Amino acid sequence: MTARRLIFAALALALVSCAGGILPKPPPAPQLFRLTPTAAAIPQAPPSDAQLVVEPPTASASLDTERIALARGANGFDYFADAAWTDRAPAMLQALIIDSLENAGQIRIVAPPSGELRPDAVLQTDLRQFEAVYQGGDTPTVRVRLDCRLVRMPDRSVLGARSFVGEATPVGNTTPSIVVAFDQAFHAAMTGLAPWAGQNLPARR
């Protein structure tokens, strides 16, 4: 290698080293959180033989995300820093609803949409609220609202429609405590949703 090439190589190495100190470092990965389904229950009656499909909940763009939402007052909306759900909120809640309905023991077959399944009914859900709401204090109230429709198949007639709301207050204003409150609020909403779905299913075709 000639002296000129050695000089150019040394200059290039120096520029790369300098750039490494100037470029911003990537932000740390967020801490991931997940919720839990409601616990298994002792059925009060034999489970329905109907097959129920649970569609992914629909949600606004602000809630259709892995980020954990918070609201301030009537108009403020934001997300917790350095924290996220393990999946987009609708996908996470679809799996939680399926597991919770299975644990309730009132419906024999509960599943996501599949070409191999001929459901007797479909559960459609709109995720209206899934956020920690700050209203002047240091500790928020976590609110979960699920607007549900039970649709008979194959004629797609609506068997019933109802909103299920859960609220919980965390023990402190820390992200882990607030996630626990999200879990409690979801469980509170499922306390009404599970029996409602089981009682309104059509008879097996």
Image (tube, grey):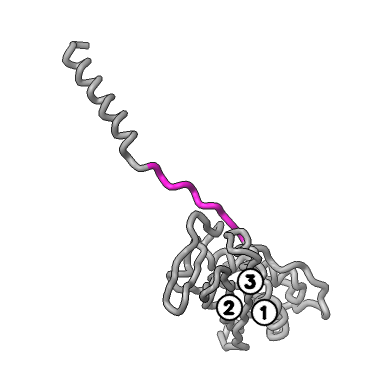
Mark 3 and mark 2 lie on one chain; the one further toward the N terminus is: 2
| Image side of residue 77 versus residue 96, left or right | left
Q: Position of residue 72 (x, y in %)?
A: 47, 73
As measured in the structure, the alpha-carbon distance from the residue carrying label 1 to the one carrying label 2 is 9 Å
Q: Earlier in the sequence, mark 1 or mark 2?
A: 2
Q: Are marks 1 and 2 in contact (CB under 8 Å)?
A: yes
Which label sits on residue 169?
Answer: 3
Q: Which residue is mark 2?
A: 146
Q: Quadrant of the C terminus?
A: bottom right
Q: Give the mark, 3 or 1, whose residue is nearer the N terminus.
A: 3
Q: Residue furthest front?
A: 137
Can you see residue 32?
Answer: yes
Residue under label 1, please give it.
193
| Depicted 157 relative to depicted 57: above or below | below
Q: Does the magenta stretch mainly form a helix, a strand or a loop?
A: loop
What's the distance in space between the residues labelled 3 and 2, CA to CA?
18 Å
Mark 1 crowdedness (10 Å alpha carbons): few <14, some 14-19, many ≥20: many
The part of the image, by quadrant, that contains residue 153 is bottom right
- The residue depicted at 50 percent of the width and 74 percent of the height is 58
Q: Count residues near mark 2 (Cα–Cα under 10 Å), then give few for <14, some for 14-19, many for 20+.
A: many
Q: What amino acid is labelled 1 in the image?
A: Leu
Circles 3 and 1: CB atoms closer than 8 Å: no
SS at mark 2 in the image: strand
- The amino acid pointed to by label 2 is Leu
Q: Residues within 10 Å of mark 3 (few under 14, many from 20)?
A: many
Residue at point 62%, 81% (across, down): 164
Judged from the image, the secondary structure of the residue bearing numbered disc 3 is: loop
Amino acid on which disc 3 is placed: Thr
Magenta-highlighted residues: 25-34
